Image (spheres, rainbow, N blue to C red):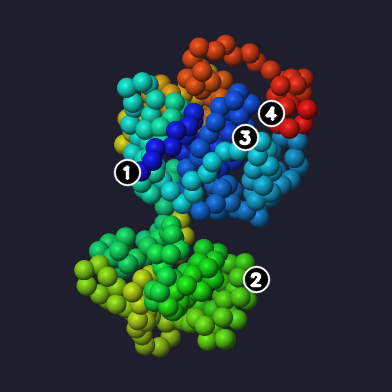
Amino acid sequence: MTETIKTDVLIIGAGPCGLFAVFELGLLDVKCHLVDILDKVGGQCAELYPEKPIYDIPGIPEISGHGLVRQLMEQVRPFDPQFHLNEMVVQLDKLGDGGFRAVTDADKVFECKVVVIAAGGGSFQPKRPPMPGIEAYEGKSVFYAVRKMEDFRGKRLVIAGGGDSALDWTLNLQPIAERVTLLHRRDQFRAAPDSVKKMKALVEAGKMDLRLGQVTALEGEGGMLSGVVARPDKGEPYRIDCDTMLPFFGLTMKLGPVADWGIRLEDSLIPVDTAAFETNVPGIFAIGDINTYPGKLKLILSGFHEGALMAQKAYHYVYPDKRLVFQYTTSSTSLQKKLGVA
């Protein structure tokens, strides 16, 4: 049986708001685990605009999305948060003692006293290639994420796409797969130049294949691939023998399983109070772009404010018998010791 992971707070979403919530909770001796559907921390900042400059973080005239995430990770380092990436919480139940049990799509089970939903506009979910019958192959021979590299050892693998995810997994899986074919509609890529250079070197050395075109059909029986049919911009369709395909065609935002957790929703957003940003379910909070209240502004700095007030209320669920004394990091030696700066 899966071992249950016990923690004070489970944060769903590891974007900037979720990361700053770790800091605010850590100051109050509250331990956190974070689950995110992406394969990296940072949420929209990491996935959508890592190099885009951000100008409205207080005290920082300009910083990139990647730079902000890096700074936030450094800020929470003293509190040793535990990250569970490439996973999505698919089930959330209330326990008899007032806590919660959460289960991810990787079959991890968490028990916690507080849940914080910091999922931005919802879950990033992979875009499904527009081809008939692909559903029959999903989870058997077509996968939208790599959970364990060993699952692809010895496979004849087609990786479809031309972004960072497609190139990264091409380079990572090439040494263990029987054969990797990278399939992209054109010979131009949206990935890091160094990754493209390494991929083309492998092609020139005969260690993998690069084919131009788009997948138009899947072949195989019982959900198991035997090959894919691709069509180039010019010329006739062709077949690639394979038993596994990884399509990386980008991500879309969906509310996802949150809608099934008994939380009140308004237009796919979560209404919260403005005293602690708690939902209609006691012990479940929502901060960042996924919540709504009168005067809400979808700004990172607003999410930081929401995380600070959330932590004050969450403390009482974690330590119901303790009195919370408000302290400033500039003057409290106990807080400075926690941060390692005393």
Q: Which residue is mark 2?
A: 194
Q: Neighbour class for label 3 at 10 Å: few (<14), some, many (≥20)? A: some
Image quadrant for the C terminus? top right
Mark 3 or mark 4, which is nearer the start of the sequence?
3
Residue drawn where x is 57% and y is 32% of the image: 21
The residues tagged by marks 2 and 1 sit, at their Cα atoms, a distance apart of 43 Å
Image quadrant for the N terminus? top left
Amino acid found under the numbered disc labelled 4? Lys
Mark 1, secondary structure of its residue: loop
Mark 2 or mark 3, which is nearer the start of the sequence?
3
Residue drawn where x is 59% and y is 14% of the image: 324
The residues tagged by marks 4 and 3 sit, at their Cα atoms, a distance apart of 8 Å
Mark 2 or mark 4, which is nearer the start of the sequence?
2
Q: Nearer the viewer, residue 224 or 152?
A: 152
Numbered disc in front, either 4 or 2: 4
Q: Which residue is mark 3?
A: 79
Q: Position of residue 286 (x, y in %)?
A: 47, 31
Q: Which residue is mark 4?
A: 338
- Tell me: 293 left or right of 332: left
The residues tagged by marks 3 and 1 sit, at their Cα atoms, a distance apart of 29 Å
Amino acid found under the numbered disc labelled 2? Asp
Q: Is residue 177 visible?
A: yes
Mark 2, secondary structure of its residue: helix
Q: Quadrant of residue 189?
A: bottom right
Mark 4, secondary structure of its residue: helix
Amino acid found under the numbered disc labelled 3? Phe
Mark 3, secondary structure of its residue: helix
Q: Quadrant of residue 262?
A: top left
Q: In the image, which disc is placed on residue 1?
A: 1
